[in-house]
Image (tube, grey):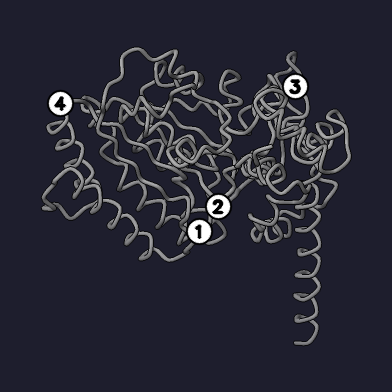
Amino acid sequence: METRRYPVDTQTFSKVIEGNYVYVDKTALVYKMVKSFNYVFLSRPRRFGKSLLCSTLKEYFEGNKEMFAGLQMAELEKDWVKYPVIHLDFSDFKSDNIDDLKDVVNNSLRIIEEKYSVEQKASSFSARLQNIVFKANESYGQKAVIIIDEYDAPMLNTIDNDKLYNQICATIASLLAPLKQLDPYLRFVFITGTTTFPQMLFSLVLNNICNISLKPEYETICGISENELYTQLKDGIQDFADKNNLTFEQTLQMFKDKYGSYHFTRQMQDVFNPFSVISALSSKILNDYWLNSETPSLLPNLMNKFDFEMEDFENIECSESCFNQPVEQVADLVPFLFQIGYLTIKDYNKDYNTYILGYPNEEVRTAINFSSKDRNIESYEAEEERLNK
């Protein structure tokens, strides 16, 4: 039997399709979203498929109909239009240096300026983005589409440094500042992040954006749903079962215990970590792929700051407003833990409109345990240093 190819090392839609990789079809939800809204924000944890979703949107709006052959989009979309797409990607930004961020923004804008033959006269990021949109409209005769992936990646690196965090947030705000006044020239704006918009960005830049992160109809737009695991990834689950001398049902339960049970809305549809599932199906080994790729270096410090223990990750009661709290200076650890994927919705009380949160699965439990041990080591070392003084 031909070996199935899984996109472990790529999040580019065109590479996935042209390389004949396994693709979990999300295009019906993409179609629904682009027909329902003009400005959209989506937050999901890292490694949950946000970059692939952004890449899918880029191909759709660029009118690359052939990319969607055999997918749900091909049946739904009858009027393919080529729009100019402005795609900014911060997902790989790892530095905590403000100058590095400015260099990345400058280089990204320069590449887009060259694409649309924009003469770089302006110096500010906001003016340059505005000029790009004007020129793109003129060149294509169509409104522009703006896609920004992982807007908050630069900020997450500095979340425990208030001064630097605010500087980086201000830099991102300066880039996004013209979006409201560019409304007549924009067909669609899509922004992803791990965390909710800081108040600075929301109030100054994008108070008209629709946050679909908690909307039940879009709960599975990123990640892999339980139904998709049963259907679109059925052959992969069977391959894994055969390789490990398991039944199909045993394998499904193992995947659910290890990688599943994320719930992002009150509807509580089971969502599986896509990076971990795809990695496990590719290697035929159940492992902590998310932990190994996303070392939670910040979590031990935050657990110390808020005096959070391992057992505090279970049976947390909160209101829905908790989920949308911005994380400036991490005033409350619970919203942050939910947004980065260490907590999930375990139950919902419709009478009181309250939620119970806890860790979603064994992979996350391992990550929390890992961080808890790091925290104890750091606390011991700090105390030893204090005593030695």
Q: Nearer the viewer, mark 3 or mark 4?
A: 4
Mark number for residue 329?
A: 2
Q: Residues within 10 Å of mark 2 (few under 14, many from 20)?
A: some
Mark number for residue 162?
A: 1
Residue with the most extreme front position: 1
Which badge, 1 or 2, is on the more N-terminal residue? 1
Q: Nearer the viewer, mark 2 or mark 3?
A: 3
Q: Measure the alpha-carbon separation of dots 2 and 3.
A: 28 Å
Residue at position x 26%, y 51% in the image? 109
Q: Residues within 10 Å of mark 4 (few under 14, many from 20)?
A: few
Which badge, 1 or 4, is on the more N-terminal residue? 4
Mark number for residue 188?
A: none
Which badge, 3 or 1, is on the more N-terminal residue? 1
- Going by the numbered disc 3, the residue's amino acid type is Tyr
Q: Residues within 10 Å of mark 3 (few under 14, many from 20)?
A: many
Q: Is the residue under label 2 in contact with that under label 1 (CB below 8 Å)?
A: yes
| Image quadrant in which the C terminus is located | bottom right
The image quadrant that residue 272 belongs to is top right
What residue is shown with label 4? Answer: 141
- Going by the numbered disc 4, the residue's amino acid type is Gly
Mark number for residue 348?
A: 3
Q: Is the residue under label 1 in contact with that under label 3 (CB below 8 Å)?
A: no
The one of 274 and 196 positioned closer to us in this rendering: 274
Q: Nearer the viewer, mark 3 or mark 1?
A: 3
Q: Measure the alpha-carbon separation of dots 1 and 2.
A: 6 Å
Spot occupied by residue 371 in the image (x, y as percentages of width and height): 75, 58
Q: Measure the alpha-carbon separation of dots 3 and 1.
A: 34 Å
Of helix, strand and loop, which one carries label 3?
strand
When the figure is inspected, residue 224 is found, relative to residue 111, above or below; the finding is: above
Q: Nearer the viewer, mark 4 or mark 2?
A: 4
